[in-house]
Amino acid sequence: MPSNQLASEPSAYLKSAAHQPVHWSPWGDAAFARARDEHKPILLDIGAVWCHWCHVMDGESYEDPAVAELLNRDFVCIKVDRDERPDVDARYQRAVQALSGQGGWPLTAFLTPDGEVFFGGTYFPPDNHASGRPGFHRVLMEIARAFREERERVTTNARAIHEHVIQTLDEAKPGAVSPDLVSGAADQMARLFDVRYGGFGSAPKFPHPAAIEFLLARWHDGRDGLAWQREIVEKTLTGMARGGVRDHLGGGFHRYSVDERWIVPHFEKMSYDNSELLRAYLSAYQALRNPLFKEVATGIVDWVLEVMADKERGAFATSQDADLTFGDDGDYWTWTKEDANGALTAREFAVASSVFDIQETGEMDHNPKKNVLWWKQDPATDDEWPVLRAAIKQLKAARDRRTAPFVDRTAYVNWNAMMAGAFLQAGAVLDRPECNELALKVLNRIWEEAWDAESGMSHVLGRPEPRGMLDDNVQAAAAFLDAYEATGHTHWQGRAIEVMAYCLKSHADQAGGYFDIAGTNGTAYLATRAKPVQDAPTPSPNGVAALVLARLWGLTDKAEWRERLDRHLGAFAGSARELSLYGATLLRAVDWAVHPVTRIEVAGPPGPGPACAMHLLALQTYRPRTVVVRKVAERPAATVCIGTSCSLPVATPDDLAGLLET
């Protein structure tokens, strides 16, 4: 019987299970071949190193020798890191959702030796639960029995689920692209808006930054008559900024809130959430000038630079864990009243406990004395503000003395590109050149280490495999365009064009849209390519691809990009309105296609001077659907074109500011 095979895997999540008594195998042909040879079902566990309930299930079940004995006898066990293999995760999530009505992590799926799901769920408690959820030991016994004794029924179920998965992997639905699509989707989002606390829907509550950016653009286009769209943006961003879902000491955001008021988060911090939220807060600050939004954006940047950035090599980490050990549930991030009192002077504690609602009884179920810091109310007087700022510094210093949760430093290309693009926006809006410097270093490294003209981007910086995933390619192309607009250096635009040429060759479907993987590897569900358009939870790669095509059209004014954009959007337009909130990235691209694009062109000598100042102003000014072009010339001049109407050239930042305002 093979032993646990995870110790040599590069994934932090797989390595963390290497000590378990379960005979885990990594995803691959060898595990499937063994299942066929031994006529055993497969237990597929998909999770991530940042996932709280994955750690819980590891501690309760996979580290239990009795459970391991049962698994090793009756199953072939495969463990997958969803960050390393999003293509595997996407397919098996759909299968389990079809069976149980919900997905998530850990994903626990039972497969035939050919890789087809016949039963599954997410977290299973070790023993039968009061809610009626069966215990894991009982589930394993029943699954093993059914596979032995009812093979025909198992196979029939597996085929039916396989057919369902194949049908749902293609999210394309042709339709007409029109302004009504944009306004109708905005109305749909408004129906989901929580008017009391901001955000969309009820608990658990996730941020939806693409929807915020979409609605901000809609408000800006119709400022006189669309106050409700501004209200959604402001109330949502303010609610998240005041809630415990934001880290008020260290900056950045936790993954989501378990309650509708944004108070109690799931404490893991994800690079992709924070890059998208950084952009949303920057855009809202540019458009609305709310100082809170600038403060929040600054906090995200500071957290990334302190915790997530590898400044020497040029990379961003993936995630920071919620917990230190099984069962701790966010103890690093939370405070008892005694903890906070011990770190502060009496006056600092009086102010901080009032602002952050630090009480004897806090918000955490596993330890009721633990408080989540959330902004209940402003300081009562002006002279309390400096006291609060001093208290925040002292609490941060005290927390820094604790052992911090694990940071996964795997440098995924898609998420590094997302953060680099957000950092380029931050460099301009917050006037922080160090953000630009790091972002460009990361993007140069992506080009040099991940790109291959024949096979596209690899998924992890410094590793040749896996590769051929659409998301890595289109997120890199989008960030290369950000770099082109930020620097004016044409090689960045050339790189984006080269990546999109690869996508056309290796990912494009003749019917429109792009497949998520460049080819099929023949293993079960991976034999079918998907065409995703839902943001779940990261921006959909087809939505990002559409935005890249729209920007290339705006930057080059070449008909081929507009034709590709129209064809691409037409393939998904039939589902865009009904997806609304969950198709916001694609809808942002629809907005580009049906409303005028602003093109700001700045010419002049390189280096400090009026042209450089006008270029920075163009990057700092909020206008939806804007491209910025920087050219070298003898004299400074800037023009603004909206659609096909262009201004006369202006030569000073003040004159350009006036043009952009009107």
Image (cartoon, grey):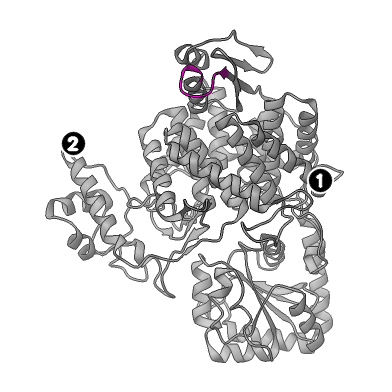
Residue 449 visible in the current orientation: yes
Q: Quadrant of residue 189?
A: top right
Q: From what the image shows, is residue 626 above or below residue 62?
A: above
Q: Is 480 left, or right, of 212 in this rendering?
A: right
Q: Secondary structure at mark 2?
A: loop
Other residues around mark 1 within 10 Å, as few (<14) / some (14–19) / many (≥20) = many
Viewer-side residue, 365 vs 491: 491
x 44%, y 75%: residue: 326
- The answer to which image quadrant residue 580 occupies is top right
The amino acid pointed to by label 1 is: Ala
Which region of the structure is painted magenta? Answer: 603-611
Quadrant (top left, top right, bottom left, bottom right) of the N terminus: bottom right
Of 156 and 520, which appears nearest the observer? 520
Residue denoted by label 2:
382
Residue 364 shows in this picture: no
Secondary structure type for disc 1 = loop
Residue at 68% across, 42% down: 543
Q: Magenta stretch containing residue 577, yes or no?
A: no
User: Can you say whether 657 is above or below 627 in the image?
Assistant: above
Residue 656: x %, y % from top left: 50, 14
The relative height of residue 453 versus residue 647 in the rendered view (above or below) is: below
Nearer to me, 434 or 51: 434
Judging by the rendered image, the residue that carries numbered circle 1 is 508
Disc 2 packing (10 Å; few <14; some 14–19; many ≥20): few
Residue for point 66% across, 12% down:
645
Q: Earlier in the sequence, mark 2 or mark 1?
A: 2
